[in-house]
Every structure is written in C-alpha cells, then in structure tokens.
Image: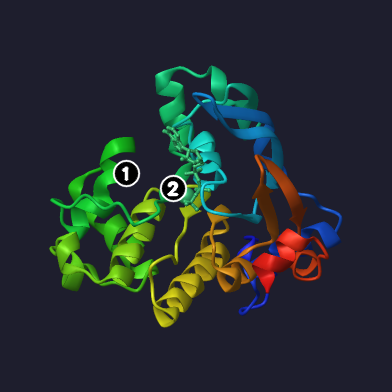
C-alpha cells in the first residue's frame, strides 16, 4: 500500500508527519544540520545552527531579511560549505564528498529559487527539461512526457506554454514553471526560497495551494523559506525562526501561533 492510500482523499500534508508520529512510527531524518558555523569574511552569518528534518516533514525557515535563510538552503544544496559543522543528507555527510558525489546528492533535491531564476533565453519546455538533461540521459519522447507531467502538476499545459520564453509569462506563471523544473526529476527533497514573494494575494494563495498539493501527491520532504505568515502556517509541519545567527524558535505551527516569544509574536501578528 502506498503512503497516499493510507490517508483520506482530502488529507492535509501538514498532518502527515503528525499522523506518523501518533502511530509511534518516526520517519527517518533526511536532512540534518549539525552545529553549523558560517561567515562571509568577517561577517558571521550562522553560529551553532542545528536542525533535523524527517522524511515527509516540511520545515519553514523564517526570520528577518539578511538573517541567513537562503544561506541555509545553499548549505543543504552544498552550494556553500560551512566553516565548521556538518550537513547530512540521508545520513551522509556532504562536506566530504567529491564533485561527482555532490551531483548525485543534488539529484535528490529540487530547488525553487527566490525570483524563479528561469533561463531567459530558454523556452518553458527547455527550462523544465533542464534538470533531466543535467542528471539523466533519457530519450527525447520521455523527456517530453516528464516535462508535460511536471507542468500539469502546476496546472500549466505544455501545448500552450511549452514554447514561451520567460518574458512571455506572468509572475505567477514563472513561479509555477520554476516549481515544475524543481519537481521534474522526481526529487525526494524540495527546497523553496520565498515561493510567494512578489506575487499578489490571489496568486500567492494559488502557489501555496500548489505546494500543499505537491506535498500530498509526491510525498516529498520540503524546506520552505518565507516571509509570508499565511503561507508558512499552511505548508509547514515545523517552523524554525532565525535571529542573530541562531535558531531562536523551533516547533509546530500551533506552537508557533501560540508562542510568547516576542520575535515570534512580531512575525505572527
Ligand atoms: N556570497 C556572499 N558573500 C558575502 N556575503 C554574503 C553572501 N551571501 C550572503 N551574504 C550575506 O549573508 C547574510 C545572509 O544572507 P541570506 O541571503 O542568507 O539572507 P536571507 O535571510 O535569505 O535574506 P532575505 O530574506 O533578504 O532573502 C546577509 O547579510 C548577506 O549580505
Ligand atoms: Mg533569502
């Protein structure tokens, strides 16, 4: 029986991990940061930051601008290496890996970048196909089918949008193409950097609905960086707040909403 069939049709992914832990079955830790320190020159950004994310959970990272949220995603992707401390993916320390091994680890991940970050000169089809061409060698008709499927997951039709350049897409459509590109190689980890920033409230809601739907249908583990309280409350199983180079709060959305911590209150209110 698949994970999905065990839950009712309309089950909320945010409760998936809770449902598992209430049955006493803790899923394995898939992403772990251990005592991470990182500075850019003299500017210390992270000091002794640790976190654990279990399979199926979605952790949102919140905090003020410049506090180091995107930096954490870059450490997980190993676009950056910590000055000290370790990042473990599936229990494997990614600090020590060779270039080829890093590519293998990255294959497990899909990244939705702050500001979509599509390739301006590539069509929607080629943008979404990019990770497939990077990670796998697939016959062209299979590439086309996978791209069609990934676009359908974000409610875009390949026939209508496939040949369009990013300049010919709206902001919300660009975000969706960015999400399709992140999921096309079926990663088990999805990383989102500010998925709703710069979008109007209605489009933001559509994108959040989409993230929630993907959590349900793909059963992935997600790390979401966001300023958007509503988005964070809906997509997360856990929330971590960063301040002054450290994690100052970690808990469930319920605990977050009811926390007396003044920094959390400021964010929530
Ligand atoms: N490559 C770099 N070189 C030097 N400083 C950097 C570099 N990347 C990030 N920084 C600095 O590190 C700090 C954390 O940056 P980061 O991008 O992680 O912030 P953030 O929390 O994602 O902010 P925002 O919400 O504005 O996106 C910032 O002060 C930033 O200026
Ligand atoms: Mg950022």
Image position of 23 (left or right of 7) = right
Please report whichever mark, 1 or 2, sits nearer to the chain's N-terminal start. 2
Q: Quadrant of the C terminus?
A: bottom right
Q: Which residue is mark 2?
A: 110
Q: Residue at x 35, y 63 (%)?
A: 175
Query: Residue 104's spot in the image, x, y percent?
Result: 44, 30
Q: Are marks 1 and 2 in contact (CB under 8 Å)?
A: yes
* Secondary element at tag 1: helix
Query: Residue 267's spot in the image, x, y percent?
Result: 65, 66
Badge 1: how crowded within 10 Å, few (<14), some, or many (20+)?
some
Image position of 133 (left or right of 37) = left
Residue 246 sits above or below residue 250 on the image: above
Badge 2: how crowded within 10 Å, few (<14), some, or many (20+)?
many
Q: What coloring was used for the rendering?
A: rainbow
Q: Which residue is mark 1?
A: 131
* Secondary element at tag 2: strand
Mark 2 sits near ligand 2, with its Cβ under 8 Å away: no
Query: Residue 231's spot in the image, x, y percent?
Result: 56, 70
Q: Residue at x 43, y 38 (%)?
A: 107
Residue 104 sits above or below residue 131 on the image: above
């Amino acid at each position: 029986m698949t994970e999905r069939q065990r839950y009712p049709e309309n089950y909320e992914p945010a409760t998936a991990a809770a449902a598992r832990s209430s049955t006493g079955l803790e899923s394995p830790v898939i992403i772990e940061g251990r005592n991470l320190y990182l500075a850019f020159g003299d500017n210390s950004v992270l000091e002794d930051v640790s976190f654990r994310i279990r399979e199926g959970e979605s952790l949102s990272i919140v905090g003020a601008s410049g506090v180091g949220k995107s930096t954490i995603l870059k450490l997980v992707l190993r676009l950056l290496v910590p000055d000290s401390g370790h990042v473990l993916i599936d229990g494997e320390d990614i600090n020590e890996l060779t270039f080829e091994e890093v590519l293998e680890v990255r294959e497990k991940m899909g990244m939705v970048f702050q500001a979509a970050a599509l390739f301006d000169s590539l069509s929607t089809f080629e943008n979404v196909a990019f990770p497939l061409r990077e990670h796998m060698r697939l016959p062209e008709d299979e590439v086309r089918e996978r791209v069609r499927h990934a676009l359908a997951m974000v409610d875009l039709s390949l026939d209508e949008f496939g040949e369009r350049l990013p300049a010919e897409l709206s902001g919300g459509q660009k975000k969706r193409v960015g999400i399709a590109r992140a999921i096309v190689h079926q990663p088990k980890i999805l990383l989102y950097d500010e998925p709703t920033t710069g979008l109007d409230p209605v489009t933001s809601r559509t994108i959040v609905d989409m993230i929630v739907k993907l959590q349900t249908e793909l059963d992935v583990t997600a790390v979401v960086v966001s300023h958007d309280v509503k988005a964070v409350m809906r997509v997360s199983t856990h929330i971590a707040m960063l301040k002054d180079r450290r994690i100052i709060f970690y808990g469930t959305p319920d605990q977050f909403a009811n926390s007396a911590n003044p920094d959390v209150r400021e964010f929530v209110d």
